[in-house]
Image (spheres, rainbow, N blue to C red):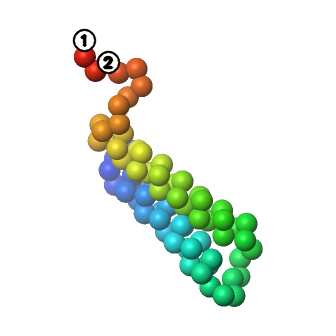
Amino acid sequence: MNRMHWGWTIALGLLLARIGYAELETADAVLPEWSILLLLTGGLIIGLFGVTGLLGLLGWVPQPGARTGD
């Protein structure tokens, strides 16, 4: 995946977390509590997955089994 895909993955995660947080803050929540929790945690996990992928794509995260030098 290129940088644009990882960026959209991060944006999607932040959007899901924001929807869950907005629903949590309203006094008359329409969604049940478990779905709000799912939106919050799922959005944050998707965002972290996107950040990790973006860092791995740019070469900032070391690859498993890569030799750094002798």
Q: Which residue is at the front of the view, 48 or 10?
A: 48
> Image quadrant of residue 41?
bottom right
Secondary-structure class at tag 2: loop
Amino acid marked by disc 1: Asp
> Image quadrant of residue 29?
bottom right
Which residue is rendered at x = 66% and y = 65% of the image?
37
Which residue is rendered at x = 38% and y = 28% of the image?
63
Q: Position of residue 39 (x, y in %)?
A: 61, 65
Residue 9 shows which numbered tag? none
Answer whether labels 1 and 2 touch (C-beta < 8 Å). Answer: yes
Position of 49 compared to 57: left or right? right
Which residue is rendered at x = 59% and y = 58% of the image?
42
Q: Residues within 10 Å of mark 2 (few under 14, many from 20)?
A: few
Residue named by callout 2? 67
Instruction: Spot the residue most to the bottom.
Output: 28
The N terminus sits in image quarter: top left
Compared to 30, does 16 lie above or below? above
Secondary-structure class at tag 1: loop
Q: Position of residue 48 (x, y in %)?
A: 47, 52
Residue named by callout 1? 70
Position of 46 compared to 26: left or right? left
Position of 6 compared to 68: left or right? right
Instruction: Spot the residue most to the top.
Output: 70
Amino acid marked by disc 2: Arg
Q: Position of residue 23 (x, y in %)?
A: 61, 78
The C terminus sits in image quarter: top left
